[in-house]
Image (cartoon, rainbow, N blue to C red):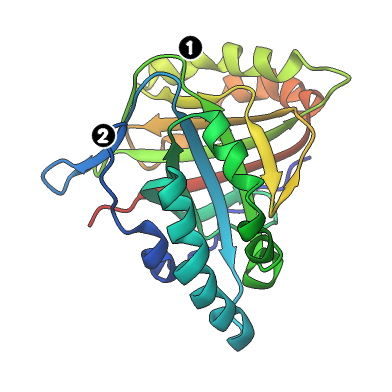
Amino acid sequence: MYKINFNGKRASAAMLAIALLSCSFAYAKTTENAQNALEISLEPSQLLSLIAIDLKNSEESKTLRKEYFTNAVPMARKAGYTPLGSLRVTEQVVGKAGVQSFVIASWPSDLDDLKFEKTPELQQYKDMRPLIWNRLDFFKQSTLSKLLLTFSKDKFYTLAIAKVNPERPDDYQTYLKNIESYLHGINARYFYQMTAPRVSKFSERENSGYRVTLVEWQKEGDLERFQNSVALKDNYQLLRAGTTGFELFRVEPTIR
């Protein structure tokens, strides 16, 4: 059974500030709506990148981080990388591998990102990644149509990362479909889903089979109510059988 931990892990994302400095491009934008929301807008065919981060805190990692942000990040920006905002992890509900923050970013297209990853000048900085971060997971998916995400200050969000079981590939999708009516009944909703993201950890490409699901909740206690609901009980076996790994995080938007 997946371990449920409500003690949580609270970590500051302040050290990511240099990576999240706003950068204006015509093809992607982020706005803060009267200090109450984080709005992220992408055009069709852009690439949305969600980056799970857990920073090391040694003196060596701090030195390398400064070098990485001074050199590699400007290279990425020049190639089309645009940081749009971040989601701070306030609690890891399921799973053990720590994440401090999820950075949201965009590229003009999937091809631009893939081209940049092969840039010879980038390779030395890619080798630094495991020395700077305990965890650096990239989840990337192209947008098929115009995308607008509005993270509200007065709403609550969870982010689930599932590794789909290749022997039972339909079970997790069935689980998500079956619990949707319960979510609607408490005015919660699927906020955004990556159904087939391209995944890499540090710099190594992972096999396909991941799904990322963001849920927007109206009340802070709605998640606990769901976890005690008949809807979860009746579909829990689909979640277990349909995944070989599952993590669930409470997250909140960073609104400056």
Q: Give, as a three-letter code, the residue at label 2.
A: Ala
Residue under circle 2? 26
> Of callouts 1 and 2, which one flags the residue occurring earlier in the amino acid sequence?
2
Relative placement, left or right, of 253 versus 166 is: left
Residue drawn at x 69%, y 56% is 97
Q: Quadrant of the N terminus?
A: top right
* Helix, strand or loop under label 1: helix
| Distance (Cα) linking label 1 and label 2 | 38 Å
Q: Quadrant of residue 147?
A: top left
Q: Residue furthest left?
A: 34
Estimate the x, y position of residue 171 in percent, counting from the top left: 75, 16
Residue at image coords 45%, 26%? 192
Q: Position of residue 2 (x, y in %)?
A: 74, 42
Residue pictured at 59% horizontal, 88% vertical = 59
Image coords of residue 180 (percent x, y): 51, 15
At 55% across and 30% down in the image, what residue appears? 110
**Secondary structure category for the residue under label 2:** loop
Q: Which quadrant of the view contains residue 105?
A: top left
| Residue with the mark numbered 1 | 181
Number of dots carrying numbers = 2
Looking at the picture, which amino acid does disc 1 mark? Ser
In the orientation shown, which residue stands out farthest toward the right?
Answer: 167
